[in-house]
Image: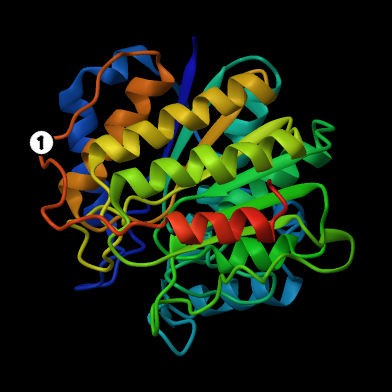
Amino acid sequence: MTTVLALAPAASHTKAGHPESFQRMKALTAALEQSGLLADLSFLQPEPATVEQLRRVHTVDLIEFVRHKSNLGGGLLDQGDTYATGETYNLALMAAGACTGVVDQIMTGVADNGFALIRPPGHHAETDRVSGFCIFNNAAAAARQAQVVHGVKRVAIIDYDVHHGNGTQDIFFEDDSVLFASVHLFAPYFYPGIGGMYEIGTGRGRGFTFNVPLPPYVGDIGYRRVFDELIGPRLERFEPEFLIVSAGFDAHWQDPLAMAGLSLRGYADITRKLLNYADRFCNGRILFVLEGGYQHDVLSHGVLNVFHALLGHDIILDPLGPMMQSEHDISDLIKRLEKHYLLK
């Protein structure tokens, strides 16, 4: 088993006091170095994505907007808190290029699977606008790389970041060759405010957007049921040839920006389910792409657990344990979603 790591930490894309900063990656890389896992991994030196690769998922106007803003020294890119520095454009190209590069290695048999530890993150970046700390949509660029360069007909993107992947949904909303499934917290005033069950795609893409909107404090049992009873059956119907995971670790009960209630053991359970899906449908071809996660111990241990699973190790690290609060029973929601998506 060969697992490739592509690392693009983007140290110069950092705003003081912002939760999405290089401090996330600094803590994570230190944990990786101390873990002993690096000796078992193959390394990909990322190259920046080309404009042609970005144009598969973004408009020229968006690409030029980010480049121009970065050339001017940076600043806010939207009315929220998505920012750029003078280095952001080049670093965002490197993040996307890391993901497309791992796809190349997996599809050519150099690696079995991989993890792109990159920033800035991408799943909120839409076709024509940045949002939610995200510049270019790394997972979307990876999906198109698999299709355009390697002839993959069906790609599934599973997004378990606690925030809905509105950008990825936007890019593939009219596309039946990419199944986008997002498992996310869906509560009043919770970012980005979309991701309901009735957002299912349109035109040719109708039925290929699969949203699982969750209430707060679902916890490990609820997430396990979502993947067993909803995600698994939908993947079985779609039969993907390549699986991409937008891996956000902000659904953990200690994350400061959300309240979904997962534990590190719960995350590890999801990872193993996804690997089983990849083995079943995709000949093991799976790429994890880092998205959110703002409690540094959670992020570090969560990523280490993914690498242990990718390497076939029977190791799960969870020094923080489960949340103390009772988990929210989502039986009724699962029944509604099964009926809505015609899974039963």
Seen from this angle, which residue lies furthest top? Answer: 1
Q: x, y percentage for residue 242?
A: 68, 32
Give the colouring mode of the picture.
rainbow
Height in image: 312 above or below 28?
above
Which residue was labeled with disc 1? 319
Depth check: 328 or 159 in front? 328
- Which residue is located at x 37 percent, y 49 percent? 222
| Tally of marks | 1
Residue at 47% of width from left, 60% of height from top?
Answer: 332
**Residue 191 falls in which quadrant of the image?**
bottom left
* Residue farthest right in this picture: 204
Q: Is mark 1 on a helix, strand or loop?
A: loop
Within-10-Å neighbours for mark 1: few <14, some 14–19, many 20+ = few
Location of residue 207 in the rendering, given as x and y in whole percent from the top left corner:
77, 58
Q: Position of residue 161 (x, y in %)?
A: 42, 55
Q: Is residue 201 left or right of residue 116?
A: right
| Coordinates of residue 266 in the picture (x, y in percent) | 30, 39
Front residue of 57/233: it is: 233
What's the residue type where badge 1 is placed? Pro
Specify the quadrant of the image occupied by residue 32: top left
User: Which quadrant would residue 286 be assigned to in this image?
Assistant: top right
Question: In the displayed structure, does residue 129 sit left or right of residue 124?
Answer: right
At x 60%, y 26%, the residue is 278
Q: Examine the rendered structure and indicate whether residue 265 appears above or below residue 122.
A: above
Residue at 47 percent across and 76 percent down: it is 192
* Front-most of residues 104 and 293: 293
